[in-house]
Amino acid sequence: MAESPSPLFDAHLHPEGLSDDDLESMRLFGVEEALIVTHHKPHPALKAKDILEDFDHLLGRELRRCERAGIRAWAALGVHPQSLPPRGLPEVLSALPGYFTGGKVVAVGEIGFHRGGEAEAEAFTEQLSLAKRLKLPVVVHTPQRSKETLTRRALTLIRASGIGAQQVLVDHCNAKTVRLVLECGHTAGLTVHPDELSAERAVAQVRALGTERLVMNSDSGYGASDILGLARAARLLEKGELSPAVIARVTRTNARRFFRIDAA
């Protein structure tokens, strides 16, 4: 009889870009829980109401789709730097606190830098301030382009915001930026994705750095994502004869602890 896959928590998922079959396949290969992270499609005429409608769609439909596939899901809500409205950001930020009730929205995100302009810096700072005031975890986006430079800039703004280091997960780290993030006391996201890390490279980082404050995810749903990336990485960790407790930390329990999800 085939051995059941280890239970996984995918800490960065965009189900609106996935089919029901994709979600069922992820569940079959061990993804039992996930964090749905908002990402609005870039549009030059994006308005505050469009972003709020996206929030409502995610909570009203995408969470339920995950649940129907057998994946318990929670959400992070925020304004992605690639999708800043020309006007109306204050309206979105004033509405955001109302979403953090009921236990399903557990973090602010994803926020941060994509190209690095001043508008991105201002939106990032304002959302860090909101997360600090609400005492919520934060998911910080780092881009492929100029990753090290923009990660350093993000870390500078995070420090200046006064938010607790333990509240911040800096995502999509590479071999260079993961060390910067961990040195600052933050949690580091290792994204197993064709545009980020292969499963082999992600596993190499775990072997090099240990498991403290490392969280794996797939960022599935946009572009050429790999819906089985997290499961593939977990399997490589198993083949490397790492203990079940070590594997569980980077593929499940660190994420649950960071997002303050109960053990039920």
Image: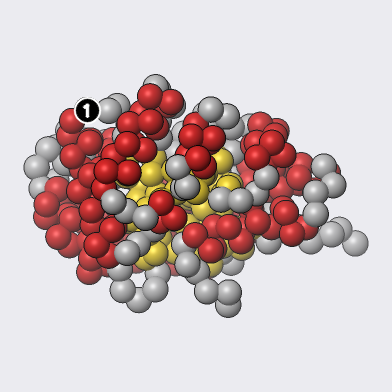
Which x, y percent locates residue 29? 69, 54
Give the position of the C terminus as an image quadrant. Answer: bottom right
Query: Which residue sits furthest left?
Result: 87
Which x, y percent locates residue 7? 68, 61
| Residue plotted at (58% across, 74% down) | 263
| Residue plotted at (30% across, 68% down) | 100
Position of 38 relative to 190 (above/below): below
Q: Is residue 217 left or right of residue 168?
A: right
Neighbour class for label 1 at 10 Å: few (<14), some, many (≥20)? few
Can residue 128 be seen at all in this image of the molecule?
no
Res 111 quadrant in image:
top left
Q: Is residue 75 left or right of residue 248?
A: left
Between residue 83 and residue 116, name the one nearer to us: 116
| Residue plotted at (17% across, 62% down) | 95
| Residue plotted at (61% across, 51% down) | 212
- Secondary structure category for the residue under label 1: loop
Can residue 253 be seen at all in this image of the molecule?
yes
Between residue 155 and residue 34, name the one nearer to us: 155
Position of 93 relative to 177 (above/below): below
Between residue 256 and residue 162, name the one nearer to us: 162
Q: State how the image is colored.
A: secondary structure
Q: Which residue is mark 1?
A: 117
Which x, y percent locates residue 132? 28, 58
Res 232 quadrant in image:
top right
Give the position of the N terminus as an image quadrant. Answer: bottom right
In this figure, what is the number of numbered marks?
1
Position of 122 relative to 105 (above/below): above
Query: Which residue sits furthest top?
Result: 146
Which x, y percent locates residue 218? 55, 44
Residue type, numbered disc 1: Gly
